[in-house]
Image: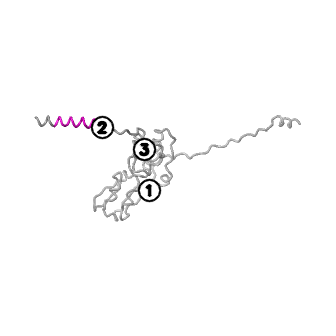
Amino acid sequence: MIAILAIAILAAVFGLLLGYAAIRFRVEGNPIAEQIDALLPQTQCGQCGYPGCKPYAEAIAKGEAPINKCVPGGATTVIALAELLGREPEPLDGAAAEKPKAIAVIDPQECIGCTLCIQACPVDAIMGAAKQLHAVIASECTGCELCLKPCPVECIHMIPIQTDTSNWKWPFPAAVAAPEVPQTQTPADPAAASGRATV
């Protein structure tokens, strides 16, 4: 009985200490950055040029990065970010827009089971074991290509995804310049012009 009471008292003391520490040493975060981070796909792929989704969200919140660099999120994420921040949606970044969406495929004849690709995948889309054949879970692959470089035998290939009704999206409308309205020329001296007309 005494042991139970002692453990209960220690648990209460440590709980109070942890609660105090959480309040005293709390780090204030940027609420906008947290909302932006919640809209990003959390693949941590680095295709945006930042080491993860959180740093990219913080850069957007500070106005240091555009909203159109998230390749896995695609146009859907761009539109969601534009609505959150009150901006106009932008087409995907040039490099991302030019590259067709693809998924990784491992050649079973060349895979040596080194597990380096498994360690490199940020979304755990590759399954396998040491010295066993690896395989890519197509539905989880974001096409970040981070698994290509570590592979010592170059048995991973990026296969473009065929566009069908399940993944087709409306393209952004092309920007159209406003037509120039011709300006009517007015005579410099209206009286002189009327005098010439009556002569």
Quarter of the figure that contains the C terminus? top right
Three-letter amino acid code at the position of disc 3: Glu
For marks 1 and 2 on the same chain, the one whose residue lies earlier in the sequence: 2
- Where, quadrant-wise, is the N terminus in this rendering? top left
**Colour scheme in the image?**
one colour
Give whichever of discs 3 and 1 has the lower sequence position: 3
Disc number placed over residue 22 in the picture, else none: 2
| Mark nearer the N terminus (2 vs 3) | 2
Label 3 element class: helix
Q: Residue at x 41, y 54 (%)?
A: 144
Q: Where in the figure is residue 135, as x and y percent of width and height? A: 33, 57
- Residue 112 picture quarter: bottom left
Q: Is residue 125 magenta?
A: no
- Residue identified by numbered label 3: 58
Which SS does the magenta portion mostly show? helix
The image shows residue 177 at horizontal and vertical percentages of 61, 45
Residue occupying the far front of the picture = 24
Amino acid marked by disc 2: Ala
The residue stretch that appears in magenta: 7-22
All told, the count of numbered labels is: 3
Q: CA distance from mark 1 to mark 2?
A: 48 Å
Label 1 neighbourhood size at 10 Å, few (<14), some (14-19), many (20+)? few
Label 1, on which residue?
160
Q: Horizontal and vertical percent for residue 18? A: 26, 38
Q: Nearer the viewer, mark 1 or mark 2?
A: 2
Q: Residue at x 36, y 52 (%)?
A: 122
The residue drawn where x is 32% and y is 38% is 25
Q: CA distance from mark 2 to mark 3?
A: 23 Å
The answer to which of 13 and 199 lies nearer the viewer is 13
Q: Residues within 10 Å of mark 2 (few under 14, many from 20)?
A: few
